[in-house]
Amino acid sequence: MNTAQFSTMDGNEAVARVAYALSEVIALYPITPASPMGEWADAWASAGVKNLWEAVPSLIEMQSEGGAAGAVHGALQTGALATTFTASQGLLLMLPNMFKIAGELTPAVFHVAARSIATHALSIFGDHSDVMAARMTGWAMLGAANVQEAQDFALIAHAATLEARVPFVNFFDGFRTSHEIAKIELLDNAVLLSLIEEKFIHEHRARGLSPEHPVLRGSAQNPDVFFQSRERANPFYTAVPGIVQRTMDRFAELTGRAYQTFEYHGAPDAERVLVLMGSGAETARATVDFLNAGGAKCGVLTVRLFRPWDAARFVAVLPETARAIAVLDRCKEPGSAAEPLFLDVVASLEEAWSRPIRPRVIGGRYGLASKEFTPAMVKAVLDELSAAQPRKRFTVGIHDDLNGTSLEWDEEFDIESDDTYRALFYGLGSDGTVGANKETIKIIGESTREFAQGYFVYDSKKAGAVTVSHLRFGPREIRAAYLIRRAHFIGCHQPLFLERFDVAESLRPGGVLLLNTPVPASDAWARLPAPTQRTLVDRGARLFVIDGTRVARECRLGGRVNTVMQTCFFAVSGVLPADEALRAIQDSIRRTYAKKGEEIVQMNLAAVDATLAHLHEVKLGTVGAGAGFAPAVEARAPQFVREVLGEILAGRGERVPVSALPADGTFPTGTARWEKRNLATEIPVWDADLCVQCGKCVLVCPHAAIRGKAYASTALASAPATFLSRGARLPAWKGLRYTLQVAPEDCTGCGLCVDVCPARNKSEARLKAINLQPQAPLRATERVNWEFFLGLPATPQAEVAPERVRELQVREPLFEFSGACAGCGETPYLKLLTQLFGDRLLVANATGCSSIYGGNLPTTPWTTNAAGRGPAWANSLFEDNAEFGFGFRVALDQQKEIAAGLLRTLAPQLGDHFVAQILKAPQSDEADLADQRDRIVELRERLRTLEGPAARALETVADALVRKSVWIVGGDGWAYDIGFGGLDHVLASGRNVKVLVLDTEVYSNTGGQCSKATPRAAVAKFAAGGKPGAKKDLGLMAMTYGSIYVASVAMGAKDEHTVRAFLEAEAFEGPSLIIAYSHCIAHGIDLRLGLQHQRSAVDSGQWLLYRFDPRRAARGENPLQIDSPRPRETIANYFASENRFRMLTKTHPEEARRLLALAQSDSQSRRALYEYLASRPGAEAPAVEAHPITP
Amino acid sequence: MNLTTNYLGLTLRTPLVPSASPLSQDLDNLKLMEDSGAAAVVLHSLFEEQIRHERYELHWVLNQGTESFPEALSYFPEAPEFQLGPEEYLRHVARAKASLAIPVIASLNGATPGGWTSFARQIEQAGADALELNLYQVPTDAQVSGADLEAQLMEVIAAVRAEVSIPLAVKLSPFFSNFANIAQRVSDQGANGLVLFNRFYQPDISLELLEVEPRVFYSTPMALRLPLRWIAILFGRHELSLAATSGVHRAADALKLLMVGADVTMLCSALMRHGIAHLRTVEREMVAWMEEHEYTSIAQMKGSLSQSRCADPSAFERAQYLRAVGVRVGEV
């Protein structure tokens, strides 16, 4: 084997390398799990890497996948070689262009990391729903089963499309293949040049639009010829399978890797055959080999070219002996006779099977949204084929107790051979475990003859995320597209996991468990939970311990234990000889960190040196009598939380049966409170005497984990001994007690509260009125105090002026304990929204960070008050959120009209005065709303006494008579880019909708891609060389209508301004837009100081605070008020504090200087423009009434 | 009028040189300095801590939040390389050298022996005409003696001297038991000049925020008294070039320092406050004064009021203090 040709990389990188080399124009838009392909391409283009024809491809980020497809379409029509990368909803947005591109017989390749489509819920994980939804577009579809194939098929697709003129989707399974790291044989340019035929490129260019030889393409056709025209293209489709196979054959000559459009694997005389495509085929092939070695006669037919479907070839490769076929579809088509692949197989057999006995065909679904598909499940399907009466339709991988579709499988069935070394690592996202494991794969994969595979499982939290790394090494190609069940080695990199689950559970007999623990080796055994001790003894395991956190800290690595634990892995696993391993780690450190400077290299090398002295083997002792692990949620939690969400929290979601889940994706709110994550190592502790009770800490807490309350002293009668309370300082609360309380198990320890606290200790100025202290010793007492605090009566709302932060703090937040980043800059705005309007709030939430920390199972932070009221929340899509929320408003208004009409109809029975009271209720403040709610209760009472359809109908819409607040929430990627058209239309509608843009100035959720909100000079993905253009001024655009309330806020800079803007926006009887500066991890800042960054953005003039209120114009005043002072610091100072700007000075210093100068100029010009607008006499102001601009 | 002076073996058109400051980070500023008559420029300092800290911080920020969340395994594009600390600084030196006709003096700021001293060689290779080594210590460890600290400084000077062959100036603070001894030892290590003195950025307190604030205060003409005394004392004692920095705001300030023996006078606060073009004003006023008082060259006045040449050498020593406070010897 020539190891020089091998490399370890994931599927996305492998595919992107080929696509980049073979493209001239690449249009991009980020979407999980395909984003890394675009990011790789952008990084290469930024570094000047050339394609196969010695040119740097043009990379363009578009406003949506629809835009990307349109741009590709245009580039293709003009004769360029163009491509894009996408998945899921992105592919759906490309469908219209895909029909066009295919209809015009245009060679092109779209590379798709196949992913679920959002239905009852969004899922970022892999299945074939998206490509199946595109199967009618007329695109050829080539599906890869592993990383090697994904790379190879990328080339085959690019080559075949040029000859065939039919465009290709090159798809591979999202995450399982796109994110799996494998050792693959790389394609070099010589192979690419040999396979791509220049003459076809020339023909493609010749067909390009040019005024030198003009043509018309894209005509409109009438019934007379459209149909015939569609049929005219048939010969091209007929030719595709032959072209693909010939291309595959030529590829085999060049590389030695032979592929078939339909590829049979298994016993030549197999009676039972599986048909499937994608990564599941890998598992199926390995399982069939295992079973056949034991005497079975099975086979697998892997579908590689799914479209155009070639029935004759399909039947030709099936063994004549086949008697039973199971077709496995990785998608679901509700209401269909069966899933698509099954139907194709059945039709093929019907039409092309010429032998006497036609095999029986059954069809099943598997693997939706990356559901595990294991050898045991493959065996279950094969076993089903052996049954006398196999189920015609089935599912495998779930427990379908509702429909009875699921096949049972044997959990203990295992086919992995002993020569494949398997290692599992449990880590936290912040400790570097995954990064170290990726390096380990590189070390073994690229410096030895061994094959290597890595797959990484992440949870959906952005703070305190748990990672599980699955690594395999072996002398043979690794074909295991499933998680490790029995590991030779388990590394537990965080001591906290020991409390939660048996970390040794997946250890094989004789395996090794390595623990990172502060417990000395002498006590390590005794301190292990009894179930873990039992597992280790039963498996005859070896146990090693190290205080890796201490070693890392002493080597200045902070919480990143990666280098330490990686060194331990090599030391105790024996996968490489000790000396060789040590050298390899050191080389890897030099390679990885060299560009960050010698200091970083040296501190990691020092950690390697320090590690082995601290690594100890621990002898197994006797098993203690300790109990098992605590339940994931408390016993007093609601049943659904305990039995469903609790199971998911405990890592047993795979076992939740079909019947336990909602049929329509509807879940209760108020569930995050049951998930006690105990993430914080330190939590804020209140100095009650020093506190000025300003409420700023409560306002800025991203997790609603610190709260204030003013209450009567009598409520303290049963207070716990450690519960703190002081006299309320606010005159309005005279005589009341005040408490500031922390939720110890929900706090993430982000420190924003401490940073914002204005009170300093008079004797020790480093201390404030809240200070961070270790959580562990406080947990038990503060848990009790928190519970007591929750039970205290609410501060009377009549004594709360919401426009004042110090009073607002006692309003109950109905958004709490989200999974957002510790120190998130977005969530304080959402929490504020719920404090102000939560009990009457409907939220339409665009897909993005806020939909993930707001709505990703198992729990949601949106919650209810004691009366059971709270925000009703829904997420439709990314692109349609404004329209989605607009629909809420229209429906609510319609229902209100219906209710009003019914009220008038029933006025004689209900009482004219009573009806008039309801219809004329002002509902402008909390007291009004409470009165109206009381009236509706009364109305329902009265309706109960009435007969007739009008009364029954009114009961269904009576709630619409209470004012509802519709807020449309999303990030800048939505508002500035993909959803802008809809947003503009909805704002122009004049309807009473409120829009909150959480502006992080980048696509945060998908990893920091540039949006049109990204400021000039910021480095972001897809803008690696710095964003060249200025930030779009969304607020100014909205202001031009004159009838929209617009505010630009930054809570960290001026909190009461933010609160005022929210109140004004809500009170405005028309559309409102609030653009809220949200600091973000993607800014490259220390999130603990996020509020200071907000202040700096405002002080430098980078972010302007203002309010534009059409009601002022109605009063003859200028509607625009600038609320931030003139800049007090330079843009340069602000830029210097954030890595997104500073990074450019380290990568492109000259360009950084140029863009900085332009950014300073942007700021001054914007300020001057706004000052001019704000200084105009009121009479010159634009229109004042909220009115529809659109029809 | 002959304003020529010699500093560190470099022949300079005038004794007016902008000292190390943030102004010299910008190439356009450097060009403006030259156009305004600067005889040489001292670039902003490359700090020992800056080199280390910047790397730690970049490393930390680029790792923050990575490999945690499946949709965002990183938050920044992968950069093929970073131009960190010395690399960026070296590029700046090279660009300055390519753009200016006047000598370019680079500046390296540190306190402790270590690998950073090797950057001196890279600075020389980037084209700097001379190097100013700014040794800035705030010792707080009660276990370390003054002698130990002085020895450490000499070790650093020797290490840097060993790295470069271009002229080396050493910039120091005045806080030594015997500065004359220090000056001699600096000379013994092979340095070519002394820059007197380093200004400490003293911390301040914010009464409103109850926080310690590092604040940069511009110097005033009063600040020149300290370098004035020590330049007067050191002038003629050894081969070291002497640069005066701190408190040079107007021509009169520069003239005083030249008269006590400075080879060059360095300006920073005055340029920050009045703009770079202020250099031209100072030069014009200097020439006017010299013409008025019938001086023909800087060389003529240099050291004329140094301790060894002035009428009352004791004026620079303790006796002058006694007179200043009204005490006559014998009455103490």
Image (cartoon, helix red, strand yellow):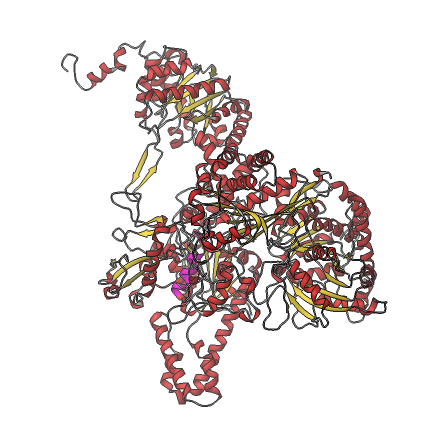
Q: Nearer the viewer, residue A17 or A929?
A: A17
Q: Nearer the viewer, residue A865 or A231?
A: A865
Q: Is residue A1026 visible?
A: no
- Whether residue A848 is in magenta: the answer is no
Residue A411 placement, left or right of A273: left
Check the picture and name the quadrant holding the N terminus of chain A.
top right
Residue A1085 placement, left or right of A6: left
Residue A853 percent across, percent down from the top left: 49, 58
- Whether residue A833 is in magenta: the answer is yes
Residue A717 percent across, percent down from the top left: 24, 65
Residue at 30% x, 38% y: name it.
B205
The magenta segment is A818-836
Residue A1052 placement, left or right of A268: left
Residue A402 placement, left or right of A823: right
Q: Across the whole image, how many numbered discs are drawn on residues?
A: 0
Residue A544 percent across, percent down from the top left: 50, 43
Check the picture and name the quadrant holding the C terminus of chain A.
bottom right
